[in-house]
Image (spheres, helix red, strand yellow):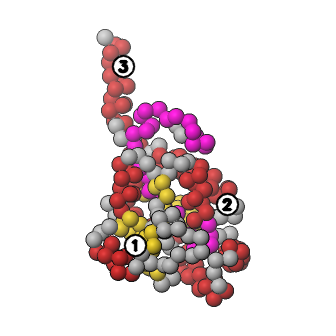
Amino acid sequence: MLGMSGKEKQPLIEQHRRGLLIILSSPSGAGKTTLARKLTGWDPTIQFSVSATTRPPRDGEKDGREYHFCSTDEFTSMVKDNVLLESATVFGHQYGSPREPVERAIEASRDVVFDIDWQGGVQIKQSAHAADAITIFVLPPSIKELKKRLIERGKDSLDSIELRIKKAEREICHWSKYDYVLINNNINDTLANIKQIVLAERNRRERKLGISDFVAGLLSEFKDARK
């Protein structure tokens, strides 16, 4: 089984499973983006879902790395053509997860981590890929600490920070829609909890492709031994 280092070779039967959709949601500043990136660092086989957005790029952001930046008309066309797995409007801008790379990953037994708003998380849980999805909501230890983290990251004006704090109240109200809820007191402890969740979910019976045939083969060995 894949261990904490991400380097151990898995037995053949362990490799035959559908990929997971690991959905991380939280209020802005509570840590979902950092956790998603750290998760791909822990296990490089986990693919990061790069969202499309109508938001203009910030300094240092690169198209195709942080986001696929597009116009409002382009985004509308993607929604109309069912190119997106989920979409939502957040702080006046549209965001959505491209469908094709995610579905390719699932079929190739690769896991995909999403850093998305609760609206997108709920949409995926209500989609045809519900069985492949695990949803994790990340809470801040306090609203005071959430505001402190938003200020320290230095990405937003004071007015924008106040808007994000107000929106956090509405976002947190949706915590009960998620499979797992974690309080992010410490980023490394929270990451360790997410790793445990991923390892356990990878081994759920219903995710194992070919497990029925494997068990049938084991049982046939008993029959052969009795001959």
Residue 90 visible (yes or no)? no
Q: Is residue 105 left or right of residue 201?
A: left
Q: Residue furthest left?
A: 81
Q: Secondary structure at mark 1?
A: strand
Location of residue 203 with respect to 118 vertically, above or below: above
Q: Residue at x 31, y 11 (%)?
A: 227
**Amino acid marked by disc 1:** Ser
Location of residue 74 with respect to 111 vertically, above or below: below
Viewer-proximal residue among 64 and 141: 64
Residue, disc 2: 187
| Number of the label disc, if any, that sits on residue 29 | none
Residue, disc 3: 222
Marks 3 and 1 in Cβ contact (< 8 Å): no
Q: Which residues are magenta?
A: 3-31
| Image location (x, y in percent) of residue 38 | 60, 56
Location of residue 185 with respect to 131 vertically, above or below: below
**Amino acid marked by disc 2:** Ile
| Image location (x, y in percent) of residue 197 | 54, 51
- Mark 2 Cα-neighbour bin, 10 Å: few <14, some 14–19, many ≥20: some
Q: Is residue 119 left or right of residue 144?
A: left
Measured in 3D between alpha carbons, the distance from the residue under mark 3 to the one under mark 1, in whole angstroms, is 52 Å
